[in-house]
Amino acid sequence: MINLFEVNETNKMIEQENLDVRTITIGISLIDCIDADIDVLCQNIYQKITTVAAHLVETGEAIEKKYGIPIVNKRISVTPIGLVGAAACHSTDDFVKIAKTLDRCAEKVGVNFIGGYSALVSKGMTQAEKLLIQSIPQAMKETKLVCSSVNVGSTKTGINMDAVKLVGEIIKETAELTQESDSIGCAKFVVFCNAPDDNPFMAGAFHGVSEADAIINVGVSGPGVVRKAIQTAKGKDFGELCEIVKKTAFKITRVGQLVAREASAALNIPFGIIDLSLAPTPAVGDSIADCLTEMGLERVGAPGTTAALAILNDQVKKGGVMASSYVGGLSGAFIPVSEDQGMIDAVEAGALTLEKLEAMTCVCSVGLDMIAIPGKTSAKTISGIIADEMAIGMINQKTTAVRIIPVIGKDVGESVEFGGLLGYAPIMPVNPFSCDEFIDRGGRIPAPIHSFKN
């Protein structure tokens, strides 16, 4: 049982160390909304989402008031629209119509984002899924609250390089269509390898087909709390450091468990998972980078950075699984550049490069996240960056992702301001050498030998 003593114990974490519940996300199945008529499909989608999620925001606010726990976002994820729209959508315009419907749903119920404008194409693409991917630039331009993702690889199936090539082109087109707002459309789109079905975090959240009709997933975040704990381990060896981080992660996860249980009971929707992902914000003291420097690094990017991140990620998971029987989603440490002041400072100091970030993704929660690059970067170079990151996920049997923003009209030495939780980012240099011939090969990179476990 979770008692009020545990809640009181976290008051200091909340008030002084930026502990928060980053999101309550309702996952909603749209399978029963499917219809061959696009107008009927959109009507069914609107009716179901606005009914199931009608009280999500007020429930979150009531829990905040009851326990004094900040709940930063209330979100919705839905069944991948590449599946839902297959029977009704015969053009990119049809898919954009669904995107606009999702946007209206999100606005109606008052959530911050809705995710699931997605396609799962790790082994191949249906015609509908290809149309959805091609519609993403227009959908991101014409909606405010819709987030999109494409899963292009997995350890079991390999990497769909035709999809990787197409997605590079889509990212570039999205950047161009939203260039008036510093290509922000790309901040709402992520490419995955081994995407989980129960991730509550945007932009990659979708409701997997193996999930229940509706589910409550909660994402908890507390980099500031972890940093404070690491400060108490100054001068101690790695064994003691790990114990301190693990125990702190346990306490943070218990907060999420409490919120998830309350939300599930109030909404009469089953509890799914707690995602304990240390997600930073631009706020001072709420930084993954600061956690790493507290371990003894001068700057993130210095030798030892990947090892420090591995420690943080592993102990967060170990603490989390002891606090809740249902830890899932991504769970670990996010390293988004634009959303983490310490990461931004490291980039501006020349300590952190794109290549070092890629190395860090081998051990972190997700991958290359919220990275701004020159707008002149070619689509095939973007595809090459994606392919590298997907390979890390495929070989290491972990989720990896790329959310990269080629900011049209800007170059290295400049920065871009996204605002809110998305923060700002310096434009990072990209390796200038070509991978065009490699990307043009097409086809599928086979699954690795260790994928055969049956």
Image (tube, grey):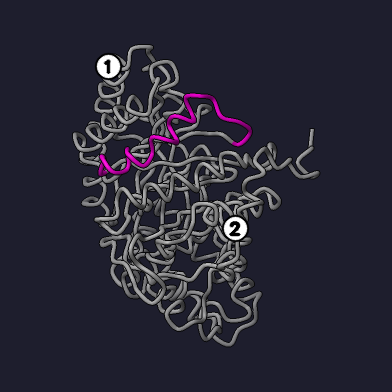
Read off the magenta span: 122-144
**Main SS of the magenta segment?**
helix
Looking at the image, residue 305 lies above or below residue 389: below
Q: Residue at x 66, y 74 (%)?
A: 239
Marked residue nearer the N-terminal end (2 or 1): 1
Q: Quadrant of residue 205?
A: top left
Look at the numbered disc 2 and give the secondary structure of its residue.
helix
Q: Residue at x 35, y 74 (%)?
A: 414
Three-letter code for the amino acid on which mark 1 is drawn: Asp
Q: Is residue 227 visible to the viewer in this orientation of the structure?
A: yes
Q: Residues within 10 Å of mark 2 (few under 14, many from 20)?
A: some
x and y percentages locating residue 45 in the rendered image? 31, 23
Q: Is residue 167 magenta?
A: no
Give the residue number, with chain letter if any, for mark 2.
318
x and y percentages locating residue 320 in the rendered image? 53, 55
x and y percentages locating residue 136 in the rendered image? 38, 39
Q: Residue at x 50, y 44 (%)?
A: 167
| Residue most extreme to the top | 36
Count of residue discs:
2
Between circles 2 and 1, the one closer to the viewer is: 1
Three-letter code for the amino acid on which mark 2 is drawn: Lys
User: Badges 2 and 1: C-beta atoms under 8 Å apart?
Assistant: no
Q: Which mark is residue 272?
A: none
Q: Which mark is residue 39?
A: 1
